[in-house]
Image: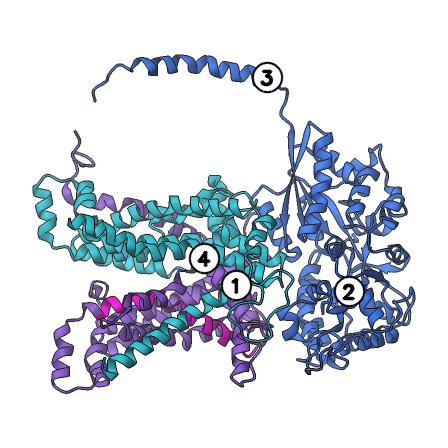
Amino acid sequence: MILHKPDRPELLRARLILPFFLFLLVLAACAGPAPTEVSFMVFGDPAEYNAYKELVDTFNAAHADVQVTLTHVPSASEYRTRLVTEFAAGSPPDISLMNYRRFASFAANDMLEPIGPFLAQSDLMGLEDFYPAATEAFTWQGALMCLPQNISSLVVYYNADLFAAAGLPEPPDKWTWDDFRQTAVALTRDLDGDGTIDQYGLGMEPSLFRLAPFVWQNGGPLVDDDARPTRLTLTRPPALEALQWFTDLHNVYGVVPGREAEASQDSESRFMAGTTAMYLNSRRGVPTYREIDSFRWDVAPLPNGRTSAGILHSDAFCLSRTTADKEAAWQFIEFANSVAGQTILAATGRTVPSLMAVAESDAFLNPGQPPSRAQVYLDNAPIMRRVPIMTTWQEIEGVADEEIERAFYGDIAVADAARLATQRTEEYFLRADFNAP
Amino acid sequence: MSFKAGSRALLRLLAALLFLLPLLWMASASLNAPGDPLPTSLRLLPPHPTLANYGRIFRLLPLGRYTLNSLLVVALAVPITLVVSSWAGLGMARLPKPAQRRWITLSLAVLMVPGIALWSTRFLLYRELGWYDTVWALIAPAWMGTSPFYVLMFYRAFRRIPAAIYDAAHLDGAGVLQTWWLVALPMARMTAVAVALLTFVFYWGDFTSPLLYLRSGEHATLPVALQTLQQLSRSDWALVLAAAVWTTLVPVALFLLLPLLFNRRQKRSVS
Amino acid sequence: MSNGRLHPRLSPSARWRLLLLPYALGVIVLVIVPAAFSFALAFFHYDALSPPVWAGTLNFVLAYTDELFLLSIRHSLALILIPVPLRVAGAFLLARLMQRNGRFLNWFRTAVYLPSVVPGAAFALAWLWILNPLYGPLNLLLSALGFAPPAWLVDPDWARPALALMALWQIGEGFIVSLAALYDMPAELEDAARIDGAGSWATLRSIVLPLIAPILLLLTFRDVIFTFQESFTQIYLLTQGGPYYATYTMPLFIYEQGFDLQAFGVASAAMWVMYAITGLIVVALVVIARQWNIGTTEETFVL
């Protein structure tokens, strides 16, 4: 290999490189320490994502030393798979938004840092400022694991214009199962007389989680023991009756779309397009529904059976045990759940705030945007119950959902669905770890 | 034109139309104006055809970044695959017969390994190598020629070159790499083009690698973007299909333009 | 100036073997080691979070007694048994149709191959729309023709036929391979048959098919493997194994066990079974080929 002298320009360049690097070093030293980066993962629709984006941007603007990066997974059911994969890969997000139905396995496997101690030392708020229902849902074997952001529940979203067009009064604050069903029937119409239904009275997911409040309202338990359940109790008469009423909405009264129609265009899209009068959902849908500009909509409570009961929907900020700088991550969690942070989220419509002060403030109750009947969510707080907190609950829901869906669309009888759901979920109850020690 | 030739031409036309039909339907539905109702009768074009959805997909997701990511993946994976698989094919072709049989059997055995057998252990491997959530995890198969099938394709092409040509090259003083680049590869041009195209299509459309080995949106490619979009806007069919059309444009354009490119090079080499 | 020699001391044949090095290394690191590790995991409990625990053959028992596992095998085989022969036959007949010269021939061939160029995820979503029960073009077409269209992907009886239907459009690779094989056939044989007065059907049966058979065998082989093992993307996007497990195949079982339930040991046991079944099918194909005297040596791959 023949060596040759570098040309003059090259030599000049080489001589400049060292001072240049020194200059950069000095510059970097003067700029001060780099901000700590904290990763935060959420799930939801684009509108929900934007809500959290606003929260994160506000925090980042006010804190130079801690910067939060937001990542987003659209599907709530795939969320857990993603989280588990990331924990297994050794690089989970520092903070993740988790639902109380799904956080147990992470807590049991020691992947979360209990948030209780951080909360105890906070100057901005204390445990007593939150709705007990929310904080209890995220307590695992005596320790508060995650800080809940909301205390949402299942409500009925309705299209006020369709009610008016049909000459019906809007749903009252107290109504019965029969009222509910008759309203749905009246609002299921074939508008152009071609034999196919163009407008449905109701839309909802045929799932265990949607069925549960109706089971409770009929006086039945969902599981044999709330603290350490060993099986579903869908085969007992109160639960079975509720399931029958639930599936009759499709099989007997036809107020919800059939399987084909639902697959062709799902009920939530139909609601937003104005072709379905009522839709069952939690507060999660509000940011998306606020984009509706073609009709007026609002919320009503669930109808009451023999008793009244609601079902808790709650998500919380969970801190990973492997987070490098937990204090920095806590700064964001604290901000997000302080009065300031929860007010921002409440304004986006995404949450029913878990801080009592914010929930009872105008930011939530009178935001100047639909729904105007926001009090409905708060009225649910005293009567809401929750599903068991256990490590295998997501699998139990998955299996039970399959059978309930089959009964809902008339593939099998209700009694068979209840029996199959009970049998197929037994193994998951056996394997589970529970909240109660 | 005789009856036979005429009926054959008609059948060919029908077959061609039949195969184009899904693509036409896909493109047509993507032109449905946002907010317009879904079709209740068969139609070629929606009543208010518009390209609005193509703009919406870029606003809803960082689709431009995902497209660049996909381009990066193929820009890396295709050349690496061509080199590795053509080397292996040539190496196999120049082995003595018994050794050739062994390598063929090995390749077939590897071909039979279910892809899913490799998912979780590759995941662990990439984690150890630090490739998790990087483009290297997406192009990793290129280092083994992507598939033994491509190796066998090159093997087939290189075996058909008479041994005399290899011997002549050897006598001229050409080493192994020179023989590969100057003698063997030009004679297997069609195979190389076919492998390049197949490899491009494979990596462009690869869904499981980004699904399993990426986490952030930063390195995501178009196929997972499609899944994300489908989950975000389940019933907004026009939107989802616009993204599908966008994902399809590059490989289809390449495929349609390639023969033209090929013909031009042929003409140049002939003249 | 270097003359392309990789190393001055190596013999010529060793240098040729060096070309195989990247491929060999890649195969070892990316296939053999992960596959061996995967198969070894079949004898452990492993959830990716804690170290593996020895389980003996328990995972195999768990899989065998899981009715979902047996169901997934049945469905996987159902998606091979009829659709694969249809696809290979379709690819061959189309190639035969487009063999002789004619006007616009290249355009027609391009059209047939084009759907295979569409990325799998995009193709799946396009068909999700086409098979839409109420608004999709296929059902609108069937209604217009007077049929009562099925619900396709949401009907347990029609979900698998829907997948098979969709797969028929992606026979491009088989089409090209069959074309190449038909071209490589000596033209004199067919001409001679035609002069002898044989009709096109007889020519096909007694002359063309026997010569093409090795390639068709290879195509069947590859198609079986592909359908059995690689159909994951489309089923995952279209039905997720539903409705009510109608399209639940082995890849889905393995994915679910591994990534949803973190039971990597059970997933690995299922992979053993999958590989064994693939091997059985391949052996069966080879036996059938021997019965019909189709060549099965490495000549098959050179033709």
- Say what amino acid the circle numbered 1 marks: Leu
Residue A214 spot, x, y in % from top left: 82, 69
Neighbours of disc 4 within 10 Å: few (<14), some (14-19), many (20+): many
Letter of the chain in purple: C
Mark 2 belongs to which amino acid?
Leu
Task: Determine the colour of chain B.
Answer: cyan
What residue do we see at 75% from left, 61% from top? A294
Which residue has dot 2 on it? A280
Q: Is mark 2 on a helix, strand or loop?
A: strand
Image spot of residue C158 (x, y percent): 54, 78
Amino acid type, label 3: Ala
Chain letter for blue, please: A
Kindly state the secondary structure of the residue where label 1 is placed: helix
Residue at horizontal 20 percent and vertical 51 percent from the top:
B267
* Amino acid at circle 4: Thr
Residue C302 showing in the rendered view? yes
Badge 1 is on which residue? C125
Evaluate whether label 1 is on the same chain as label 4. Answer: no
Residue position for label 3: A29
Using the rendered image, report if marks 3 and 2 lie on a common chain.
Answer: yes
The residue range painted magenta reads C157-182
Q: Which of marks 3 and 2 is in front?
A: 2
Is residue B125 visible to the viewer in this orientation of the structure?
no
Quadrant in which residue C248 is drawn: bottom right
Which image quadrant is residue A390 in?
bottom right
Chain to which mark 3 belongs? A
- Which residue position holds label 4? B248
